[in-house]
Image: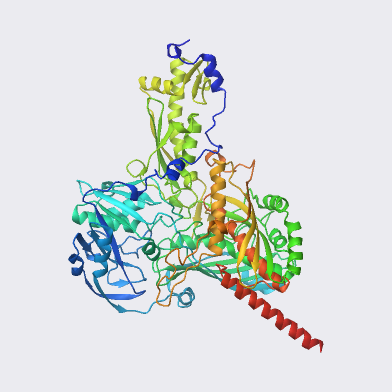
Amino acid sequence: MSNHHKNKKSYEEMLAEAKNDLTTGVGRSVKHESAAKQVSGEAVYVDDRLEFPNQLHVYARLSDRAHARITKIDTTPCYDFPGVAIAITAKDVPGQLDIGAVLPGDPLLADDVVEFYGQPVVAVAANDHETARKAAMAAVIEYEDLTPILDVEEALAKEHYVSEPHTHKRGDSSEALATAPHKVTGAVHIGGQEHFYLETQISSVIPTEDGGMIVYTSSQNPTEVQKLVAEVLGVSFNKIQIDMRRMGGGFGGKETQAAGPACIAAVVAHHTGRPTKMRLPRMEDMVMTGKRHPFFNQYEVGFDDEGRINGYEVKLAGDCGYSPDLSNSIVDRAMFHSDNGYYLGDATVTGYRCKTHKVSNTAYRGFGGPQGLIMPEIILDDIARQLGKDPLDVRKTNLYGGEGRDTTHYYQKVEDNALPDMIADLEESSEYRKRREEIRAFNASSPILKKGLALTPVKFGISFTATFLNQAGALVHIYTDGSIHLNHGGTEMGQGLNTKVAQIVAEEFQVDFDTIHITATDTDKVPNTSPTAASSGADLNGKAAQNAARTIKQRLVEFAARHYQVTEEDVRFQNNYVLIRDEILPFAEFIELAYFNQISLSSTGFYRTPKIYYDRDNARGRPFYYYAYGAACAEVIVDTLTGEYKILQADILHDVGASLNPAIDIGQVEGAFVQGAGWLTSEELVWNDKGRLMTSGPASYKIPAISDMPVKFNTRLVENRKNAEDTVFHSKAVGEPPFMLGISVFCAIKDAIASVSDYRVSPAIDAPATPERVLWAIETLKQQSKTEEKTASTETI
């Protein structure tokens, strides 16, 4: 026996342990790495960091006009408040004023013109937040009013765009519509959505001796914050360090719009030389920051007697707000997903990027996909009502499948389509047919309460539509005690990304999860990171971390083979041990041995997504590496006297490939479903005729509560179906796709309303389907039914 085994576990004991499987690697339900800290209150967020004795706090004075020219700014009254250090305007920004994410149009502070109610004009820094607020409100700002455009339909009619329209076209949709046996037409408003992350936008900055900044920020995009802070200060990127340990939620709202507070705080710190924090109160956060894009969608669709679509024309008009932000990519993704899981025949899909004088809308879970993907579900419901068919049968008729019906309207082939099998599985397990008959019987005998049922699928493309963003880096160190340091370019916002990436590294080295220590996302360690968005966090950063781990592991295998004079095939890592033919070493001892033999125990890793491209000029390509699939069956009950409703049951079947962590994935699926249902039911954004957001707090904006959860909630992951593409351990993304499972609730509510007219009419209802809108739709159908009965009676006479 080797010397390092003396007074330790016997060879037989170690061999027995090594033969066991690792219990905390990939595919295991390991708990979230911060769970204990979060429930105990020990998890440190930006606002929890210890403050410096001379730290400043910033408050922004916001525009109270939607569109106006600034004629006067006087900050002199701000200095009447003891503790005020500085009041800044656009003129005080030392470098570049514009912080637009992709295209210009987002001044850090309004310069000459304001373009939405709530745009920052003046920022005041003081010793405490309340003093800064009072001083900011004392600034004198005078305006000359300009005419605002506040309605997306008006912007569309006036061709008031942030960028030009774009079209996907396959075949001759005009001819197909002209010759179609049946047609449906309509228009629908799809509402926006407030992110309502628990932690509002916040950044804390510390000046450095060389004119740079250390920035602690709650951001999904540390590299962009680094870039923009550098640009507003007029310094090189390498002087700005971004530290991002965790966010208290993001959902896309911190992809671009976390940069504003960071940049304002940095400008203040630059002028004063003092550490500076800017934390937005809830109301200011909701007024200042963008939402999910509201859309105004119009459609004309032709179909045959079976309900099969053969001509499809859809116009998607996104309300972008006052600036481009990420709207080009968001409207593109709405266009890409306007087929959901269905073959559209001859199709023309046009996306419009409408400019209105409201806050610039931005990324939100699904990134425009939901606003496009809901359209075929609305259309297929209309078709089913017109033909007197079950909506599920019409959906199944139109699914992708078979030669000639397997290519999207942007010419990507739909391969490995899981939807037919998944829908059949869920249809059976949810007892859809039985419940459909029971609900019809219930509705026939219940004059007041009506039930509705809908089973809807999801096909969601995974990859950034801006192709260059599909890359990631990572950094792995192994220390001589066998502990592992892991850093990657993704950001943790509660979704469990760090846990999954740590599991991947643990799996590669075959060590316990607790061996891995993940540190804050840091631009000093992993540069040029892509935002954690587009459901790509685990796909990209997991692969990068795996690449780094495998580089080190290969060095270790080569060393072991040389040192013990065996072949590389004789070296195995297994359950915290390294097996080298007849030798067994605990992982930590082997690492120490490698160190003494001068083996590098550190590596960077990199990954770029293969196969994807998009030719924008010809509107065709393969913008997505693969598709994730899901299906949900929702049952609701509606009170026809009040429009109120309740989700009685939700049955979900979702495809995550080979799950990296089933518990986290199920949590993501269920949370996304509820958030998606909230978008389409209770979460209503309301502006007044002056462009002021009236739903600017939890008293007026209703996110789903525990009482809004389904009474019965059944969730399953698809088993034994690996991703056909070479993703990390053949898993699939889970962040965004299940959000659209909530569409089943919207369709179920419409199904309940349709029962009022014995399912003969598809109710026209905008989203969100608030109780008020539900009641109006019910009353409309009742009036239509009365009119039809009166007409029929007259004709009989």
502 lies left or right of 101:
right
- Count of number-bearing discs: 0
621 lies left or right of 77:
right
Is residue 472 placed above or below 578 in the rendered structure?
below
Residue at left offset 34%, top offset 67%: 119
Residue 291, position as x, y percentages in the image: 44, 63
Residue 364, position as x, y percentages in the image: 47, 58
Q: Which residue is most to the right? A: 797
The image's colour scheme reads rainbow
In front: 129, or 349? 129
Residue 53, position as x, y percentages in the image: 22, 49
Residue 352, position as x, y percentages in the image: 49, 69
Is residue 522 placed above or below 71 in the rendered structure?
above
The answer to whether any part of residue 70 appears in the image is: yes
In front: 563, or 637? 637
The answer to whether any part of residue 617 appears in the image is: no
Image quadrant containing the C terminus:
bottom right
272 lies left or right of 28:
left
Residue at left offset 75%, top offset 61%: 438
